[in-house]
Amino acid sequence: MFIVPFVFAFGVFWELIEFGVDVVGSATGAGGAGFTHHGLNDTMLDLVFNTMGGIVVALWGTVYLTDVSGAIQERFERRSERAD
């Protein structure tokens, strides 16, 4: 539930950095320094792929890491019982 919005938000942040570097590079004549902004279509395609990647990771994580979180919880519960 949190992975997809986090990935999307980071993608938006990255696109803003790309745009900012492009603007500063154009204003100073230094170029894009590798972070060239290719337009709105490129930005939208990047955000779509970021979202799709976030969904894949969220689904994979739900399926494969559910038992891991349960095991970690049990381990912490056993440690807290020993500490008492």
Image: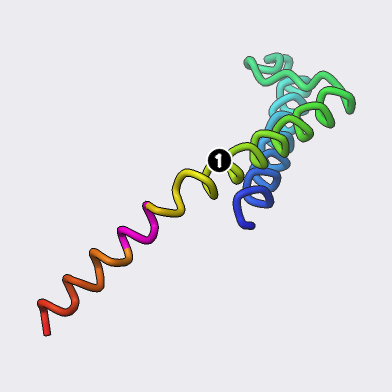
Left or right: residue 22 versus residue 80 is: right
Start-end of magenta stretch: 68-72
Q: Is residue 75 above or below residue 49?
A: below
Q: Which residue is mark 1?
A: 60
Q: Please indicate whether residue 64 sits to the left or right of residue 58 in the image.
A: left
Magenta-colored segment: predominant secondary structure: helix
Query: Residue 38 occupies which quadrant of the picture?
Result: top right
The amino acid beneath tag 1 is Trp
Q: Is residue 78 left or right of residue 36?
A: left
Percent coordinates x, y for residue 26 in the rendering: 77, 20
Q: Within the image, what quadrant is residue 19 found in? A: top right
Look at the image and say whether residue 28 sits in the magenta stretch: no
- At 73% from the left and 30% from the top, the residue drawn is 49
In x, y percent, where is residue 17? 68, 35
Q: Quadrant of the N terminus?
A: bottom right
- Secondary structure under badge 1? helix
Q: Is 57 situated left or right of 80 in this image?
A: right
Residue at position x 46%, y 54% from top? 66
Q: Residues within 10 Å of mark 1 (few under 14, many from 20)?
A: few
x and y percentages locating residue 11 in the rendered image = 68, 38
Residue nearest the observer in this picture, 49 or 60? 60
Name the residue nearer the viewer: 7 or 14.
7
